[in-house]
Image (spheres, rainbow, N blue to C red):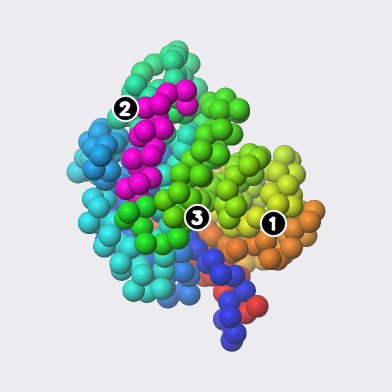
Amino acid sequence: MGGGEPRFAWRGLMLDVARHFHPVETVLAVVDELAARGLNRLHLHLTDDQGWRIEIESRPRLTELGAATQVGGGLEPSPAYFTKDDYRRIVAYAAERGITVVPEIDLPGHTNAVLVSYPELAPAGVVYHETKPEALPPHPYEGIEVGFSTLSLGLDATYDLVRDVLREIAELTPGEWIHIGGDESLSTDPDEYADFIRWVTAEVVALGKTPIGWHEITRVEGLPDGTIAQYWNFVEPEEPHGSHLAGWVAQGRQVILSPADVAYLDIKPHADHPLGLVWAKGPTSLEDAAGWDPQDIVDAIPGMTPAHVLGVEAPMFTETIATLEDIREMAFPRLDALARIMSEPR
């Protein structure tokens, strides 16, 4: 990969353990793969509609009820989640190999598992998902649609729960960052969403951590200094994503680049592949993963410079990815190509 310092300080992979649960030994094997390629961040997507995967002692129903299933069902044993000791083991193992674990608690959407656990936090008349448009109480979800869930943001109890979760996650996490999600909150009132994102990022800062959110947070004004956005749109930004990102960097804020059409490892590598999805402009070939330059995005965003780019991360959501073999099948060789981009000399 050449000599000198790597081009990017943040060189990462995101692993979704919510849609399909991946046990500790699988995560440790992934850590070994990252370390072998010079990557230094493991972003764990710990919660989503299908499952809550981290023990929170003050809120035991999150795992007792919210970790009972996964995409397609068939979760054995059930519930399935990381105990605090499991998580500490992953964090320590990664740290020994130069990798920082970044936990993500996705809020205020992607929260059906929370609502299964604490249905009193569901908005009145919650719509479960588009195939069942009648109002339903939250129940375990085994599908892959997004955007139907949201916390009720007018309740003190919602903020009490989130505060408890963040406190325990911060206590478990020696790394600097906590990811608060913020994406695809399609059922959340926009004004309430903005108020919540301002509140939750301030809570993270008060815990001594740096908040990260998916790039939907870039449309919210008044976030704490140092808040980081993770960009998941395309190398050629669509609107309004591009305009929001331009406004973000105009404030001197940084971005992690994860463009879905080249960096998402859950996208099929070719049309006939049995695993993966194709929503990001169709399949992503090895040539696609290897052939882009992060500077392409910098050049496309008015006012953006390389200094605004903290790094690059390759997400792997797991709608179709159930085993370590699946992870390896989908990651390689595309992750090798992305690792070269992340680690090339400055």
Report how far apart the C-alphas of labels 3 and 2 lie in the structure. 27 Å
Q: Earlier in the sequence, mark 3 or mark 2?
A: 2
Quadrant of the image containing the N terminus: bottom right
Task: Identify which residue is drawn at 42% across, 23% down.
Answer: 155
Q: Residues within 10 Å of mark 1 (few under 14, many from 20)?
A: few
Q: Earlier in the sequence, mark 1 or mark 3?
A: 3
Amino acid type of the residue that numbered disc 1 sits on in the rendered structure: Gly
133 versus 264 height, above or below? above
Query: Which x, y percent locates residue 65?
Result: 25, 32
- 313 or 305: nearer the eye? 305
Give the residue number, with chain letter if any, for mark 1.
Answer: 252
Q: Secondary structure at mark 1?
A: loop
Query: Which x, y percent locates residue 279?
Result: 58, 42
Q: Which mark is residue 118?
A: 2
Eye-nearest disc, 2 or 1: 1
| Residue 136 is one of the magenta-drawn residues | no
Q: Residues within 10 Å of mark 2 (few under 14, many from 20)?
A: some
Task: Identify which residue is drawn at 69% across, 56% down.
Answer: 252
Q: Residues within 10 Å of mark 3 (few under 14, many from 20)?
A: many
Amino acid type of the residue that numbered disc 2 sits on in the rendered structure: Tyr
Residue lying at the far bottom in this picture: please name it: 3
Task: Identify which residue is drawn at 35% across, 50% down.
Answer: 169
The magenta span reads 153-169
Residue 233 visible in this rendered orientation of the protein: yes
Report how far apart the C-alphas of labels 1 and 3 lie in the structure. 15 Å
43 versus 203 height, above or below? below
Residue 340 visible in this rendered orientation of the protein: no
Quadrant of the image containing the C terminus: bottom right
Q: Secondary structure at mark 3?
A: strand
Task: Identify which residue is drawn at 35% across, 68% down.
Answer: 94
Eye-nearest disc, 3 or 2: 3
Q: Which mark is residue 210?
A: 3
